[in-house]
Amino acid sequence: MTIIEIIETKKQGQPLSEEMIQFFVNGYTQGIIPDYQISALLMAIYFQGMNDEESTFLALAMRDSGDVLDLSDIEGIKVDKHSTGGVGDKISFILGPMVAHFGLKLAKMSGRGLGHTGGTIDKLESIHGIQTELTEEVFKNQVRQHHLAIIGQSGEIAPADKKLYALRDVTATVNSMPLIASSIMSKKLASGADIIVLDVKVGDGAFMKTVEEARSLAKLMVEIGKLAHKKVIAVLTNMDEPLGYFIGNAHEIHEAVQTLLGKGPEDLNHIASTLVAHLLVQSDLYQDFDIAYDASRLVLQKGLAFPYLNRMIEDQHGDSEMLLTMPLYFSSHQVQLKSKQSGFIDRIEALKVGKAAMLLGAGRQTKEAIIDHYVGIELHKKVGDYVDKDDVLLTIYHQEKGLKEATKLLENAFVYTDHEKEVQSILDTIQ
């Protein structure tokens, strides 16, 4: 077998065998096969596609190129959650404590942000003293004892995926459904979880702009999970406006805490409870989704999950008192943005809001950039709300950096209509 034979097979539109896929993934990861030949193969895949079985073989080969977390020595049902990335997405900090309350165990390894979407670990590090790098033994012990840990990715998780993605980025082959699905699932399959829920964002602030695109990706990822003998559910959620009211690192931790205390906005309550309910049903803790959903909502209303977040922060040496006092740490420099017209809000373009937060310093334009955990944006209005001219739309918490450019983006992010609009947070479910 040679790489030329593999390129020719895919160029002719034929499926690649498991052996072929392992051959090129291992060869490229080890530096045996050069960039130019893998570039040719990626382009052939881009045009000819892959079937579900090929996509699964690719996800598994990339998973096995590095460390795979073994959670088999932790009793109970282990679950994981992945979001495809959005603006104001703090669901992990809500879902984790909720599933812990129900006795499920979340051992989550997350990444940092780049571009307009924030990173889970960056948000967590707005809490003073928090440790996001733990040894595997400490990480697993924390999950074993208290059901919940969220840390940065340790070791070499799917190094083949990192190398292939870098090449896709410079060869115009990023936007390929099987390559996207395999990339995401290679990392999720390395997490060691029994059940995985995928939060597939759809809309202006998401990678997938249409429901049709997102549904295709979700179906493929769920099928890869099934073929890899994992339970996987995908929920399509709306990203045509930021999630919740707060965007920024400390700001999103604050809103997650408020949600866990029963004071969260409806979109966060609904999405978090939906994702948790699916995990409860797949775990056989509940047989009926609606009953599981109602139980999840009740946990939020009564604040029953908050102690699990508090304990996780303490376990990871963070200052847990900040959870209830986080607004005191927000940047003291504030600017309010007012509406220039009256009407119903039709859209709040999430991409512009995310880019504005990045310009303020809440996100990174390059991997080397240092973020400011305490700048951010607080929305005072959401899609569907009626506003009068000069009503305050949002507050910008800043340190001067990027303020002018961010303000201009935010001014153009609000789109108005003359009629009421109903907002739908959950767009579809694939399982």
Image (spheres, rainbow, N blue to C red):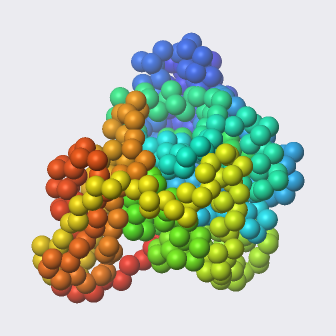
In terms of depth relative to the viewer, which is nearer, 84 or 256? 256
The answer to which image quadrant residue 131 occupies is top right
In terms of depth relative to the viewer, which is nearer, 77 or 226? 77
In terms of depth relative to the viewer, which is nearer, 129 or 133? 129
Q: Is residue 292 above or below residue 230?
A: below
Total label count? Answer: 0
- Residue 309 at x, y = what percent? 65, 60
> In the picture provided, is 220 more to the left or to the right than 289?
left
Q: Is residue 407 above or below residue 291?
A: above
In terms of depth relative to the viewer, which is nearer, 344 or 82? 344
- Residue 315 at x, y = what percent? 72, 49
- Residue 394 at x, y = what percent? 28, 67
Residue 29 in sight here? yes
Query: At 79% from the left edge and 70% from the top edge, which residue is drawn?
Result: 284
> In the picture provided, is 404 more to the left or to the right than 244?
left
Q: Residue furthest bottom?
A: 419
Query: At 85% from the left edge and 49% from the top edge, which residue is drawn?
Result: 74
- Residue 87 at x, y = what percent? 40, 57
| Quadrant placement of the C terminus | bottom right
Q: Is residue 253 above or below residue 140?
A: below
Q: Is residue 425 above or below residue 402?
A: below
Q: Residue furthest top?
A: 32
Query: At 62% from the left edge and 48% from the top edge, which residue is drawn?
Result: 318
> In the picture provided, is 174 more to the left or to the right than 96?
left
| Quadrant placement of the N terminus | top right
Residue 240 in sight here? no
Query: At 82% from the left edge and 53% from the top edge, which residue is drawn?
Result: 145
